[in-house]
Amino acid sequence: MWLRIVGKAMRDRWPRVTLALAALTVASGLSTALLALYADIESKLRGQFRGYGANLVLSAAGGAPTLPLSALAEADRHGEAAPILYSVQTIRGEPVVLAGTDFRRIEPLSQYWEVRGQRPAAGEALVGVAVAERFQLRPGDSLDLGGESRPISGVVVTGGPEDSQILLPIQDAARLSGAGEQASLIALRVPAVAVEQARQRLAQALPGVEVRVLRAVVESEAGAVLKIRGTMFLLTLLVLAITILSVANNFGAMVHQRRVEIGILKAIGGGDGRLAGWFAAEAAAVALAGSLAGFLLGTLAARALTWQIFRQPAGTAWGTLPAALAVTVAVAVLAVVAPLNRIRAIQPAVILRGE
Amino acid sequence: MFLRLLVRSLARSPRRSLSMAAAVALASAITTAMFGVLLDIGDRVSRELRRLGANLLVSPQSAALAVQIGGVDYRPLAGAAWIPDSALPRLKSTFWRNNITAFAPFLPVTVELGDRKTAVVGTWFRRQFAPASGETLSTGVRDLNPTWRVAGNWIEDRLADAGAREILVGSALARRAALRPGDRLRLLGEDFLVRGLLDTGGEEDDQIFTRLETVQSLTERPGQVARVQVGALTKPEDAFARQDPKRMTREEYDRWYCTPYLSSIAHQIQEQIPAAVARPIRRAAENEGRILGQVRLLMLLVCLAAMIAAGLMIWSATASSVLERRGEIALMKALGASDGRITALFASQAGFVGASGGALGAAAGAALGHFVSLAVFALPLDLPPLLPVLVILAAVAVSLVGSAAPLRASLSWPVAPALKQG
């Protein structure tokens, strides 16, 4: 019987119920989408900051020129590491800086390099754009290094020191300079939140090695992520607050619209508790349906947005669903029950007369 | 008469009018706040990313190949190409001078310290200068690199002083050589006082820094600078910006010139300093371009979603308000009002509520956006006055549209049943 009353009430007023449902779905969808984006934004942003490359540099302590390549093993435990070995060689009578590195390892640390051509394989060389201009070199030409002729796989442009260097696989560079299994420095990228911890652990594990934090990279990343997250957080909070107010407004208005109906029900003997129960059930049903629909739409929207912007899949936050549902239903029920208390004071006769 | 009807109609059910106005206000507040923050966020995040340091390098056009490891130059100094330091103030005379947040000149010389070659770098720390516009500005490595720290004191070089003999020693070098602030060090044949120890985490920690004019006079290179690092706020490069400026049409060129792409700022610097070439430092430029583009796109899409949601909220409130008044509409028709009259009355009501709710909401939204901007960036919101006006207009438009369909439906229903339903 109870179910029939509630069900018929909703069916009779289906335009109004549909509008309330639509408004609630939209509000809930927007809140869900924003919450999902906010929860994900830090990991997406930090992923983007990887493009800056190394945030830690290992060099030999005490100002020695090189450190052993074996330090790479320890560095690998914390992040992505690549060795670099510098030497000065003579090309056509002029001194040029040679940088030996492991091109597979340096790949994730050098995403900002512009390489015209290819990164070099064993036996090949990558020349900086200033070197290429100075010696009139192009990809495909050959370069005479230490008596060996090397094909040039490409020209690299960075706006940094690499532009004036010749880059080779580290074994070749070590052979040319007679350095052995050594590196001038090891560049390391560690997740930004773990930088200090990594520095301490590496300093402990490698006593002959000086570990420096590239503070400019770390601090600019930290500042930008903090501010963007802060903006998203406050905007999400704002939208949530406005959504809650809007739901309350919407459902409260629905009650006011039906005051005649309430008057009639009271006149035929409906108790306050029972009335509250019916209206609360109706509100809860609409709120539940709207929240679920909103949650689904909002999650889909957030996924689509994340893919569109970051080209990376979004992390799912199923945990927010019960909370979101609970809040929306609670607000809807409160919005319906609260004004009922006011109407309780008014006599049915007054309402039925039309006042 | 019409006005009296309008006012009476609104006042008869204040709760309903207020409820609808509240919905419009809430929706307008969301829209105003979010678009206000969106318009600012690019600039704010860009400034945050500038803490990394320079994104442009200005070097002499005829510079020979650099032979540098860790900042130490292995080439002899004689005959090296240079940029005149008299050209430096012109950096703040370009079209995009307000986007150039800081710059610093460098003149390094290699010395033997103990048994190692070490770079002694002459630069500006925070030097006053006067560009063509006449005002006094200051810039230097302290402004270009806000993440640099000094244990002890910075060198105060607001004004040039060729006779001063002070240095900042890189922290790693100071550790090795057991130097502390207050110690003295002999360089280039003179005694220098260590004012402080510089800590950056980069290769500067192995170098020594002093005033530009000190290095210029001690190496007999008056008025010369080896390179200049520049930090600029830029718009991310898109396909348009990557074209060759020499191949652009007049209109395209003007558009490119008047947009703060890194390439056009570099071009303008080269116009001001003909002997120099300006190139992007890709590690900074590429990444901040990509990140800024993503943040802007994120905010824009979120704002559009919020705008659609806000519109739907207003539409729903307006439509349900009209639906509720079917009895009233039927009564008016029974009394002889024409459809046109009734439509005009309801449209005016919707318009009035839309405008007042929109105005209130826009004001509240501006305040909320202002609060967000202060809380996150410690800067006030830079709100264009057009935004609240557009929001109010949109609120009115959506209110009118929202009442249109239910109104038309109600007008077409037979009068008697509608009156009976009340």
Image: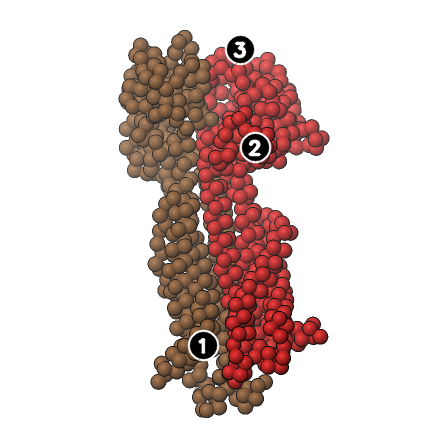
- Classify mark 2: residues with Cα within 10 Å, few (<14), some (14-19) or many (20+): some
- CB of mark 3 within 8 Å of CB of mark 1? no
Instruction: Give me the C-alpha separation between circle 3 and circle 1.
Output: 91 Å
User: Could you say which disc has been placed on residue B267 in the image?
Assistant: none
Q: Is residue B216 above or below residue A29?
A: above
Query: Residue tagged by mark 1?
Result: A13
Marked residue chain, label 3:
B
Find residue B75 and report its horizontal and vertical position in percent. Answer: 47, 13
Q: Residue at x 62, y 65 (%)?
A: B351
Question: Which chain is in red here?
Answer: B
Q: Earlier in the sequence, mark 3 or mark 2?
A: 3
Label 3 sits on a secondary structure element that is loop
Q: Residue at x 62, y 49 (%)?
A: B384
Coloring applied to the structure: by chain
Marked residue chain, label 2:
B
- CB of mark 3 within 8 Å of CB of mark 2? no
Label 2 sits on a secondary structure element that is helix
Q: Residue at x 57, y 60 (%)?
A: B28
User: Could you say which disc has been placed on residue B252 in the image?
Assistant: 2
- Classify mark 1: residues with Cα within 10 Å, few (<14), some (14-19) or many (20+): few
Q: Quadrant of residue A218?
A: top left
Query: Residue tagged by mark 3?
Result: B78
